Amino acid sequence: MGPIRGSKKKRKIDNENVLVCGSFEEGCADWWEQFCKQIAGSVSPSKSPDHFESVFKVSRKTFNYICSLVNEPMMAKATSFAFLNGKSMSLYDQVALALRRLSSGDSLTGVANYFGTSHITVSHVTWRFVEAIEERGLHHLQWPSTDYEITQIKSKFENIRGLPNCCGAIDTTHIMMLLAVTDKNNNAWLDRMDNHSMILQVIVDPDMRFRDVVTGWPGTLDDASVLQKSSLFDRSEKGERLNGKKLKLTEGTELQEYIVGDSSFPLLPWLITPYQGQDLPETKSEFNKRHLATRLVAHRALARLKDVWRIIHGVMWRPDKNRLPRVILACCILHNIVIDMKDDVLDELILTHQHDPGYRSEVCDMADKNASISRDKLALYLSGRLAA
């Protein structure tokens, strides 16, 4: 289960609202100056890039790109939006409003007061933006499709702590919700920590870019169940994914492509989990250290996602559970866009490993016999003890 995209009819574009891509940078500079004057009553106006980034969590370069990306679908619709003073909202205004809503985590009323508009307008503009990002930005969230790309990913993962032929790290996080008492389906969303939540499962590359996203499932499900309901599981089990070149460890011993995950996931030929138990022998203990260092990239990616796009950071007040998966997906796409744009704003972020405070890791006892043998051989190989 995940974000479900409905069929959309293409509408005729109002040529008066279309901006030429080459004019976005200049147009944004003029817009920012006017915007600072407009919000002077809310914050101290400033023309500095630092102030821009603190407001929207992206640089002007990335903001310009996002505007060019969503321009056509956002401006093609007949509905127009306005501030309380009657002034029509430009594309920049709408993108700024949506980014502020997604990145600040402020309430609809809080964002409305900041921009001088109504909370209904904030809701409608944000949703239009989410739809536009999903429609035009999905190419930023794709499984690697070329041999060169997958080779680079494997090389970077191996450079972390030596795990060869690794293609990704998998992890999950909970998007917490405060549901209405009258909601008859409340218990379906109650997770093991007695929070109402929706699960987000991601596979991350070594640059903390999301390569696969599954969301929409209720917190009652454990990580293994969410995985088994995903298309990734079906395709990997059928040999349609993680089916690239095997790595020859020694004569007669090959290692297929795989991803790494913690003990909440099953041990499978294409998903390697750590050894469980205390007082492990040195070979297995060392393997676990390497494994942890490698999969921490997924922890960091989810922590950054929630730190930057704070609408999914805390407890969401009575969200539309049908729309929430698409809001989460939009945040994941924006996360990737910031990475793809090599945005300098990333340099200012303090990265943490915490994205699910209070949640302890689950333990899945499911283990494929062949996968267990492969993990043992990999551990011996890494320790230099696997005989040729």
Image (tube, grey):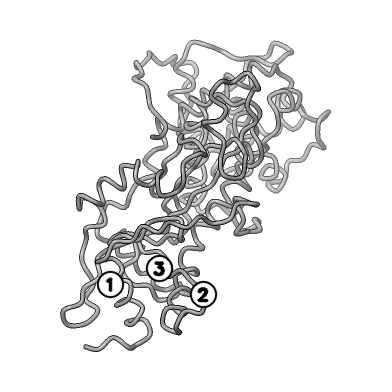
Earlier sequence position, callout 2 versus callout 1: 2
Earlier sequence position, callout 2 versus callout 3: 3
Circle 3 sits on which residue? 156
Q: Residue 166, position in %: x, y? A: 34, 65
Q: Secondary structure at mark 2?
A: loop
Circle 2 sits on which residue? 278
> For this view, does 41 lie left or right of residue 123?
right
Which of the 4 image quarters holds residue 261?
bottom left
Could you tell me which residue is drawn at 47 percent across and 53 percent down? 171
Amino acid residing under circle 1: Ile
Which of the 4 image quarters holds residue 176?
top right
- Mark 2 or mark 1: which is in front? 2
Amino acid residing under circle 3: Lys
Mark 3–mark 1 Cα distance, whole angstroms, equals: 25 Å
Residue 30 appears in the figure: no
The residue furthest left is: 252
Depth check: give the residue in front, 334 or 196.
196
- The C terminus: image quadrant: bottom left
Could you tell me which residue is drawn at 17 percent across and 82 percent down? 251
- Mark 2 or mark 3: which is in front? 2
Depth check: give the residue in front, 208 or 369.
369
Query: Does residue 359 lie above or below 72 as drawn?
Result: below
Circle 1 sits on which residue? 373
